[in-house]
Image: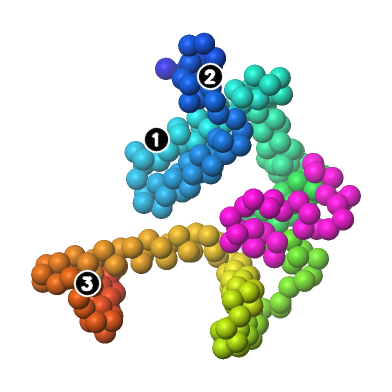
């Protein structure tokens, strides 16, 4: 099956699923808002398959994500708003406009030049960003908090609101830690919530200045914690030991053993 046939078959499938008379009752009931959480979930599952380097899963998860695009497009078509072809045509036109160094005469020095200059200039022209009250106004509010924090910081940095060096952020981090200690000592939950948010925000800024995607970094830390914890559980089970019966010192020793195993396997 060629690309056109495959896409058309998927579009026809969604039309059939959404048919009020002969379709699936669940699919017929859905709307933009009810489907949106699934769209977000599928995007994360694509990222997870990439992280695990499982190409079979990646193929499947990309299909699930594509289905979400088709689902939203079919709902829009039924409402007379737009169709899948409009989505594809618009994104193609947008990508041509944002790549003048490929489809035009403009030159790009490197990937960073594309991201920080060409793309931002073209996106500004498309959205009329110059007319916004603030450089932060077009940062979507429904992004995951870590991603949104870094986007807000990147926007602010464009107008010079930025430390000179990433190491300078460490001083700010120490200041926020001190304020966190004061909040904990005061026992006021609202203040603790506020100071913890400040600490997260400074930490994400530190990551951004180091060129690190904090969402990706935390996802990596989650995987590492899960891997080590499961390894620790397995070791204790092999000794007929239950973790709930162990002391914190014994569990810490088990944790350090997992770290040592990883270092030896990596050597």
Point out the image quarter for the N terminus: top left
For the question of whether residue 240 can be seen, the reply is yes
Query: Which of the two discs, 1 and 3, sits closer to the camera?
Result: 3
What residue do we see at 72% from left, 49% from top? 119
Q: Horizontally, is 203 left or right of 55 in the view?
A: right
- Please check the rendered image and state whether residue 143 is part of the magenta-colored stretch, yes or no: yes
Tell me the quarter of the picture where residue 177 sits. Answer: bottom right
Residue 189 x/y as whole percent: 59, 76
Query: Which of the two discs, 2 and 1, sits closer to the camera?
Result: 2
Q: Which residue is mark 3?
A: 243
Q: Horizontally, is 120 left or right of 132 in the view?
A: left
Q: Which residue is mark 1?
A: 60
Residue 147 x/y as whole percent: 60, 58
Tell me the quarter of the picture where residue 60 sits. Answer: top left
Query: What range of the chain is rendered magenta?
Result: 126-153
* Measured Cα–Cα span from mark 2 to mark 1: 22 Å
């Amino acid at each position: 099956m060629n690309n056109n046939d495959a896409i058309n078959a998927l579009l026809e499938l969604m039309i059939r699923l959404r048919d009020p008379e002969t379709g699936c009752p669940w699919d017929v009931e859905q709307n933009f808002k009810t489907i949106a959480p699934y769209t977000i979930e599928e995007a994360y599952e694509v990222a997870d398959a990439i992280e695990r380097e499982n190409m079979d899963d990646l193929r499947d998860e990309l299909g699930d994500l594509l289905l979400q695009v088709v689902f939203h497009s079919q709902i829009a078509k039924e409402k007379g708003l737009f169709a899948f072809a409009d989505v594809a045509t618009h994104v193609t036109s947008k990508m041509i406009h944002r790549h003048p160094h490929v489809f035009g005469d403009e030159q790009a020095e490197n990937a960073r030049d594309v991201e920080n200059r060409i793309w931002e200039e073209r996106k500004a022209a498309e959205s009329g960003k110059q007319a916004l009250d603030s450089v932060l106004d077009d940062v979507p509010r429904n992004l995951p908090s870590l991603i949104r924090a870094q986007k807000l910081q990147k926007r602010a940095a464009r107008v010079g609101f930025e430390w000179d060096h990433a190491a300078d952020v460490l001083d700010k981090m120490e200041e926020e830690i001190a304020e966190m200690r004061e909040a904990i000592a005061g026992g006021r939950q609202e203040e603790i919530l506020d100071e913890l948010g400040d600490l997260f925000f400074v930490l994400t800024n530190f990551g951004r200045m180091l060129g690190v995607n904090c969402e990706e970094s935390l996802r990596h830390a989650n995987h590492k914690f899960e891997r080590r914890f499961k390894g620790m559980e397995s070791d204790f089970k092999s000794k007929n030991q239950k973790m709930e019966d162990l002391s914190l010192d014994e569990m810490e020793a088990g944790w350090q053993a997992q770290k040592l195993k990883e270092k030896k396997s990596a050597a």
